[in-house]
Amino acid sequence: MIDIVKAVQHADPSLGTYVVVLRADARALDGPERLTPEAQAWIEANAPGGRLARVRVLLAPYPGAMPAERDVTVAAFADARQLAAFATTWTGDPLPEAEEEP
């Protein structure tokens, strides 16, 4: 994962230091180029200035393999706290709904 982040930062330095590369199936995404309305509202409320970007990077699929171009979706933030809060909220598996007691 560190190699992907370094490749993203090299490809687009304007994103800054605090970036997270999102998987295609991330709950925060509504397609590769936009956030879900809920994730967008969360960013507006909790991480002003946070943004989503598509970045083309050169990555090897595994160590020793020939690198190939790949487009990745990146969320960029102003500071580490915003990144950590976003990652905690939007990249983990959702918690199961609490069962109501009878």
Image (cartoon, rainbow, N blue to C red):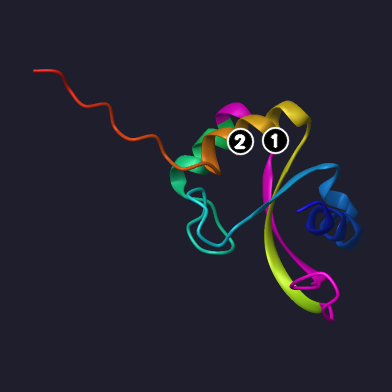
Q: Is residue 14 left or right of residue 21?
A: right
For image coordinates 87% across by 51% down, the residue present is: 14
Mark 2 secondary-structure assignment: helix
User: Disc 1 marks which amino acid?
Assistant: Leu
Rendering coords of residue 80 (x, y %) = 77, 30
Q: Is residue 37 left or right of residue 101?
A: right
Any mark on residue 86, and which? 2
Mark 1 burial class by Cα count in 10 Å: few <14, some 14-19, many 20+: some
Residue 58 x/y as whole percent: 83, 72
Residue at the outermost front position:
64
Taking the spot 50% from the left edge, 59% from the top edge, the residue there is 25
Taking the spot 87% from the left edge, 54% from the top edge, the residue there is: 6
Residue at which label 1 appears: 83
Q: CB of mark 1 within 8 Å of CB of mark 2?
A: yes
Residue depicted at x 55% and y 44%? 91
Viewer-proximal residue, 72 or 14?
72
| Closer to the camera in the image, 6 or 15 | 6
Mark 1 element type: helix
Q: Residues within 10 Å of mark 2 (few under 14, many from 20)?
A: many
What's the magenta region? 45-67
> Up-down: is 89 above or below 75?
above
Q: Position of residue 69 (x, y in %)?
A: 78, 77
Amino acid of disc 2? Phe
Residue 63 is covered by the magenta coloring = yes
